[in-house]
Image (cartoon, rainbow, N blue to C red):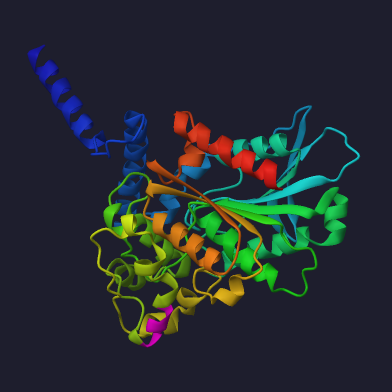
């Protein structure tokens, strides 16, 4: 009996040690964050060793959560939900059934997952799209795009752009009774990256006559030039999205060549002859002083082979921060959410600064006590009070401005 109690005690201690992770003092409902973090870390460990042993690619294992969370489209008396295609790109449509003489608003949503995981069919995204359609009485188009490592940049962008371009055609809008003057695009994380890139491209695309009215970017990924911004440094080991995983997402977006991952981890993937690109991500001028803190802005350089081999690294369709101000001028109202304990925090804030410099109207909500992924956490089984507040704020902003 004593030996069983001892074993139980040791297992409990080991489990507690594994789950425990130091968190900032101002974080609410810490135990929920710890459980989520432990889940992601466990999956990451399994993925790492499966990849190391040649059993399964790292990202194929990470897709386990996506498969587990996928739900079927289930319509009810208030909404028709269906999986279909737009221009041969899979989408999930949410169409309110309430009859009205007015044209509906439209919201295009692009899911996150580091261009390697995630799905419009995941329960959190499905619920968020339902909430959006119900709150706004809008058609919601949630786009499925192909994922790395099976495909790499620019395929993910091309898939999303093809679907958006098709939807913005006047005949398609008329088919779904959508007001051409009231269509927005939104996305979280890598989805926010794709939304921002699509917004920039469609603005200057003469073939697209109907332009998007608004973009809502939720803790977006905006650049792959500098992985040593203050937020990358101070949040390198924070829950949900550590620096190593975000860099892995970036490298897989471009290629399965592990030499790129190693160079990106060392922040030595940009050659000196491309040093001018750092002006677009110069956080020493684009971040407020309280976020720069003790950090020293010192760009690092590598050899030119990688960008020659993978030119997508320097492509603005992958890194929307890498454009001149004149390319940002004329963008519509932009809503940006950032979180303090997120490696991507400074990406979002730098984009806010760049947009404002270009004369774009921006509303920026920054949350000091939370992590990457908070909007989606709000509709997971481990519901969080702050997450609900952020979701409500997001939905209200769309409703008031679209």
| Residue 215 figure quarter | bottom right
From the top left corner, tell me how far across and down residue 151 is, in percent.
53, 65
- At x 62%, y 68%, the residue is 200
In this picture, residue 290 sits left or right of residue 197: left
* Front in this rendered view, residue 240 or 22: 22
User: Where's the N terminus, which quadrant?
Assistant: top left
Residue 229 vertical position relative to residue 75 in the rendered view, above or below: below
Q: Is residue 102 visible?
A: yes
From the top left corner, tell me how far across and down residue 119 is, in percent.
57, 48
Secondary structure that dominates the magenta span = helix
Q: Which residues are magenta?
A: 273-277
From the top left corner, tell me how far across and down residue 36 is, in percent.
37, 36
Q: Is residue 275 within the magenta segment? A: yes
* Front in this rendered view, residue 64 or 387: 387
- At x 19%, y 34%, the residue is 17
Q: Is residue 337 within the magenta segment? A: no
From the top left corner, tell me how far across and down residue 175 is, in percent.
87, 51
């Amino acid at each position: 009996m004593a030996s069983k109690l001892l074993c139980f005690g040791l297992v409990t201690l080991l489990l507690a040690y594994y789950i425990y992770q130091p968190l900032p003092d101002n974080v609410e409902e810490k135990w929920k964050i710890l459980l989520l973090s432990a889940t992601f870390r466990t999956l990451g460990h399994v993925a790492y060793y499966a990849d190391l042993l040649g059993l399964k690619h790292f990202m194929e294992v990470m897709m386990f959560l996506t498969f587990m969370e996928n739900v079927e489209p289930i319509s009810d008396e208030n909404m028709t939900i269906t999986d279909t295609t737009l221009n041969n790109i899979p989408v999930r449509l949410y169409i309110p059934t309430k009859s009205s003489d007015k044209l509906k608003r439209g919201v295009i949503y692009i899911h996150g997952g580091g261009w390697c995981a995630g799905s419009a069919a995941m329960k959190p995204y499905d619920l968020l799209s339902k909430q959006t359609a119900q709150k706004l009485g809008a058609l919601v188009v949630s786009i499925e795009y192909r994922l790395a490592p099976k495909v790499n940049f620019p395929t993910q962008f091309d898939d999303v752009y093809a679907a958006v371009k098709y939807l913005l055609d006047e005949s398609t809008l008329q088919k779904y009774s959508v007001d051409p003057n009231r269509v927005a695009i939104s996305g979280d994380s890598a989805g926010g990256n794709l939304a921002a890139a699509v917004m920039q491209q469609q603005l200057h695309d003469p073939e697209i006559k109907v332009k998007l009215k608004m973009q809502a970017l939720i803790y977006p990924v905006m650049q792959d030039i500098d992985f040593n911004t203050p937020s990358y440094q101070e949040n390198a080991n924070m829950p949900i999205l550590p620096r190593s995983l975000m860099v892995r997402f970036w490298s897989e977006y471009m290629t399965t060549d592990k030499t790129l991952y190693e160079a990106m981890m060392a922040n030595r993937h940009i050659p000196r002859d491309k040093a001018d690109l750092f002006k677009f991500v110069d956080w020493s001028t684009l971040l407020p002083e309280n976020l720069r803190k003790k950090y020293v802005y010192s760009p690092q350089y590598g050899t030119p082979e990688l960008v020659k081999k993978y030119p997508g690294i320097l492509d603005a369709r992958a890194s929307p921060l890498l454009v001149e101000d004149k390319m940002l001028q004329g963008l519509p109202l932009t809503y940006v959410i950032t979180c303090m304990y997120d490696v991507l925090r400074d990406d979002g804030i730098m984009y806010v600064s760049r947009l404002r410099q270009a004369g774009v109207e921006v509303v920026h909500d920054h949350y000091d006590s939370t992590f990457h992924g908070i909007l989606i956490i709000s509709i997971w089984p481990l519901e969080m009070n702050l997450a609900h507040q952020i979701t409500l704020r997001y939905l209200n902003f769309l409703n008031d401005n679209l």
